[in-house]
Image: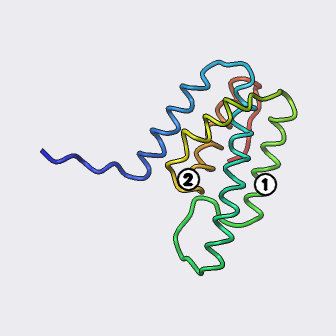
Amino acid sequence: MRKRRVSDAEKNCIAEDRVVEYLGNRPGRASIAANATRRLLEQWEEERAEMIRRGDPRKVYLGGADEIERLHRQLDKVTERFPSDRVAEDYVVKMLGHLPPDAAAWTAYGVTRQKASDELGLGLLR
């Protein structure tokens, strides 16, 4: 029997579930997720600049600089409230490292939204 190919959307969901489970109810989970997201956004910004330079037409999760800046402002609302754990951030980044940079950043932001809500009662914009 042939194995079914896992879609990109399924890969994103599986990765998100793993990160959510890893962070669990750990103190500072929202800040850990937010700082990991910030790092992944920086990686995506570098990749995006390279794509623009090459004229790469690939469809992406995160588009323009305005959208990326808006996400950074949302992340600031989380990171100013709690200290983070750099080792845990590194692990979250590693857990999402198999995804394309835009998908990794977008997936991490989804985790941040969830953890900010359950830990801080903070609603972040999509």
Quarter of the image holding residue 125? top right
Q: Residue 76 versus residue 85: which sits nearer the camera?
A: 85
**Residue 62 shown left or right of residue 95 in the figure:** right
Does residue 64 lie above or below 119 as drawn? below
Q: Which mark is residue 103?
A: 2
Residue denoted by label 1:
70
Q: Earlier in the sequence, mark 1 or mark 2?
A: 1
Q: Would residue 84 be found to the left or right of residue 54 on screen?
A: right
Q: How is the image coloured?
A: rainbow
Position of residue 95 relative to residue 49, above or below, is: above
Which quadrant would residue 48 be assigned to in this image? bottom right
Whole-percent x and y of residue 5? Answer: 29, 51
Give the structural element (helix, strand or loop) at label 2. helix
Answer with the quarter of the image where residue 70 lies: bottom right
Looking at the picture, how far across and down is residue 40, in whole percent?
66, 49
Q: Position of residue 101 (x, y in %)?
A: 59, 56
Q: Residues within 10 Å of mark 1 (few under 14, many from 20)?
A: few
Q: Residues within 10 Å of mark 2 (few under 14, many from 20)?
A: many
1 or 2: mark nearer the eye: 2
Q: Position of residue 126 (x, y in %)?
A: 67, 48
At label 2, which amino acid type do we have? Ala
Name the residue at 70% across, 26% down: 29
Query: What amino acid is at disc 1?
Result: Arg
Judged from this view, the residue extending furthest toward the left is 1
